[in-house]
Image: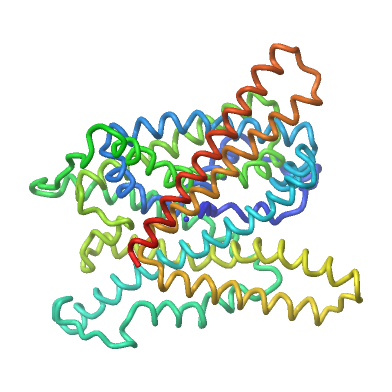
Amino acid sequence: MEELARESISLLAKPALDTDGPRLGSFGAIFIMLKSALGAGLLNFPWAFEKAGGVNTAVAVEMVSLVFLISGLVILGYSSSISGQNTYQDVVREVCGPAIGQLCEVCFVFNLFMISVAFLVVVQDQLEKLCVSLYETVTGSTEAEMPHHWYTDQRFALFVLCVVLILPLSIPKEIGFQKYTSILGTLAATYLTVAIIVKYYMKEEHTAIITPTYTNGVSSWASMFSVIPTICFGFQCHEACIAIYSSMENKKLSHWVIISVVSMFFCLLIYSLTGVFGFLTFGKEVAADILMSYPGDDVVMIVARLLFGISIITIYPIILLLGRSVIQDLLLRCRRRHAVVTQSYENRSRVVLTVAWTAVTLLIAIFVPDMSEVISVIGGISAFFIFIFPGLCLIFSMQTEPVSPRTKIVLTTWGAITVLCGAFIFGQSTTIAVMELFNKF
């Protein structure tokens, strides 16, 4: 979910910061990094732990992934410092060339689009549980007795929510008020982690089956790698990290390394605790969205659902704005080649793009089986931002920067390894997502 998430991904839409303005300190940078990483991806971690084959395997994969996650952040900070650019796309374009820069823009838009789908899937899941809870409270009946009409379907509720609330919030050219609600995602993630831990210890007996389905062979390896897309989606703050680095008061690379390590450590702690205790609570029965595993009348989890729902409603327009701005800039550039771009044309294109983006993401969210398929696709695309583009930046920068031959060989090799790992993750996660989607239909 900004990545998710993504709660601070709005930084990407800002122009280069005024050098005379206030700068970020260490704690501010760490906090914004956490806001960028913590979000709806947290909901999928207990399910990922189950798919990986248990706690030990999942945590081991997390620890290995952490090396590449931190490496990518450090490389991007270094690339920003040598290129003088303040956004992810500009850094990639400046360091790697215009062709790779265009590929980065395409991946950027598609990633934002799939994040929008994931957000609506999460909202739809929470609407289902909230509707059940409301019905049980008002009528005193059980979920099994709830009548199923088209107007009681959560998909219809999601459609109404998009038309009445999300679409009007997304149409304006600028949506500055959302910056005041960016804390909601972090609050929701922290609350959910604490709630899951408390719920585990409040449970009288633990009968969940936590034995892995596969213990050896090819299937066990496939299960282990299945956790990687969730890790990529959850820990992804790399698009925002360059804007954060550019805003910092102390831009020494050694200081940025510390910021990256500390931020990823806290993310690891929160995600791991959620994954471990969520998996131990439900075992093999855990849902792809952990909140769907809890009953609809659980007051503690109702609060979590409301927090995540409100957070997503306020962050969705920011995601849409970022994706729309890239597409609209391309349309306006093409228009200028043949005619004058008027204000009315710009307004019409903005409205059409907003309606189209919302409508298509809504349709996909309504018909997608569950959140896990969306996460797999996003995790594959995230591999570009976490592995492939940082690796390419390192390789290209080593061709121009004055470094010793030994350092050049070592760093170029590491960049190549990072790119290869990213290509493998993209291919593996995307292929599995497509195959599972076809199998469910």
| Protein image colouring | rainbow
Identity of the residue drawn at 62% across and 46% down: 239
Across and down, in percent, residue 218 comes to 31, 36
Number of marks drawn: 0
Across and down, in percent, residue 413 comes to 63, 22
Quarter where residue 50 is shown: top left
Across and down, in percent, residue 326 comes to 71, 61
Residue 395 located left or right of residue 32: right
The quadrant of the rendering that contains the C terminus is bottom left
Residue 210 located left or right of residue 330: left
Across and down, in percent, residue 380 comes to 51, 48
Please say if 257 is above or below 4: above
Residue in front for this viewpoint, 296 or 344: 344
Residue in front for this viewpoint, 214 or 292: 214
Identity of the residue drawn at 10% across and 47% down: 207
Quarter where residue 434 is shown: bottom left
Please say if 320 is above or below 103: below
Please say if 360 is above or below 184: below
Identity of the residue drawn at 57% across and 62% down: 113
Residue in front for this viewpoint, 258 or 339: 339
